Amino acid sequence: MAVPSPHRTPLTRPARLALATGVALVAGALAVPTAYAAPAAGAAATGTTRPHDDFNGDGYADLAVAAPTATVGGSKGAGYVAVLYGSANGLRTATKQLLSQNTAGVPGSAEPDDAFGSALATADLDRDGYADLVVGVSGEDTADGGAGSGLVEVVWGGPEGLSGGAALASGRNVLDGLGAEGRLTTGDIDGDGDLDVVTVERLHDPRVLKGPFGRDGAAAQGEQVVKDEFDSRVLDLATGDVNGDGITDLAAAQNDNEEFDARRVVYWLGSRDGLTPYRDVEGTDGYRLKGGENLDVGDVDADGIDDIVTGRAVDGYDSDLDTPLPRGGRVTWIPGTEAGPDGTRAVHLNQDSAGVPGSAERGDGFGTDVRIADVDGDDHPDVVTGLPGEDLGAVKDAGAVVVLHGTAAGLTGAGAQAVTQRTANVPGTAETTDAFGRAVHLGDADGDGLADLAAGAPGENSGAGSVWYFRSSPETVVTPNGTTTFGAGTLGTDPTNARLGTTLAD
């Protein structure tokens, strides 16, 4: 088994956010103070025994899902986050909770195009034993950065669930979009036992806010910004221990600003002094391994060192000519080693790979989102990926989710399973542009030791969006009477272009 970071569980990837001090917001005149408040007594011990996404400390993983384009209080695009709490019977729609910048205690106010929920992450930032929710507000205008510079804030967990909050960091550049989708995660980057928040400024520079965090949102150890020598673009972030040294590392999917389809995988090793300079993952030809738009980190082969899994959903570009299995999108497994990720042993899978359901067709979007966790309980984490462009017969872009299984030899297509709105026991009807599988999530909401699947379909009901939750078993990700779906009707929210299910918390 891998040496875990203190916040990690075998079920879900951690997410980290960056924190800045002295941040003032134009809206609401909020500021991030510099003082650090000590955690509650005994928090360090209890914080490592609960799931990293357990907001109320009852031992069951909870689910946070965003509708960042939703109308809130008459403000189009203000955005909201819906939270469902876990139980012995899985997620409970009866205990739903809605959060926005109009919620008491949450910094700021709902304004047009703020995009509250543009990115979501979970971690116990204040060491009180309860997971907290970190929220990106990428469209926020701030005093430090100006229009669209973005904001990262936290909503605190506690015995009654999520309540209250604090601003963590604001963008320092116009249109920086701090807290944008894919550019927010958490992890103990310096190995001191406290969780840090990582986001991205100037679209390519990792910004690490060093925990622990006070309830006022202040980071006790300041921050680190790692400059990128190239004009690249970070598309997604994830954390894990990719060289087995016991300190959390940071991995990113990137592309070249000059070439849209020039994907690569990079990583920054963690150290006692923070992140070290970035490194490329290289392939068998000695050049940068072709990556994708998103990635996750986890120990798929259960050898004690975390691996990187990337999803490359785009196809039909020049890079198709010199990269494996490009048609319809693909997923790539890159094993971790003591020397770091080994791209020479990478395994690529798409819908034409043996055992994978369906067939590879241009525009399927296989690899649109990837998450790693043990779905079937065999102690080898599995990989789920979305295919929002999958056609179901004559129904275009209805979408699907595929589960790929982990083994001692790595990721395999053998025994892979597909889930759609046409799968038995799955509620709803597959419709054109539903985009089922646009976002996926794994978490043990019923406490049985198996990671349960959640899938978002932001195109459902003419763009209102919906989310499906499936209770796992050792045989299948869909069990009879084990599926829950919810949308604007359940939540009591404005459905107009809300696109619920665009973002699910890490």
Image (tube, rainbow, N blue to C red):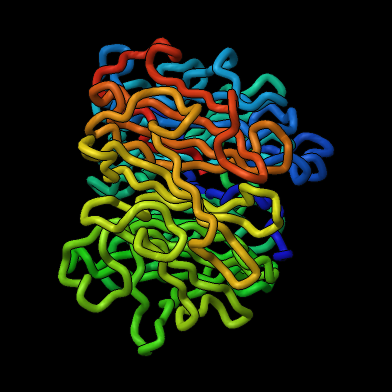
Could you tell whether 479 is left or right of 130 in the image? left
| Point 70% across, 60% down: residue | 4
- Whether residue 266 appears in this view of the structure is yes
Q: Which sits in the foreground, 387 or 162?
A: 387
Could you tell whether 155 is left or right of 265 in the image? right
Q: Give the image location of residue 181, x and y in percent.
A: 36, 45
Could you tell whether 256 is left or right of 406 in the image? left
Residue at far bottom of view: 286
| Point 38% across, 26% down: residue | 466
| Point 68% across, 73% down: residue | 245
Above or below, comparing residue 43 to residue 162 in the picture:
below
Q: Give the image location of residue 429, x and y in percent.
A: 34, 25
Above or below, comparing residue 473 to residue 333 in the picture:
above
Q: Quadrant of the N terminus?
A: bottom right
Could you tell whether 11 is left or right of 448 in the image? left
| Point 46% across, 28% down: residue | 426
Residue 204 is drawn in which quadrant?
bottom left
Q: Give the image location of residue 45, x and y in percent.
A: 82, 44
Q: Give the image location of residue 302, x and y in percent.
A: 67, 66
Residue 478 is drawn in which quadrant?
top right
Q: Which sits in the foreground, 391 or 211?
A: 391
- Whether residue 199 appears in this view of the structure is no
Above or below, comparing residue 187 to residue 245 in the picture:
above
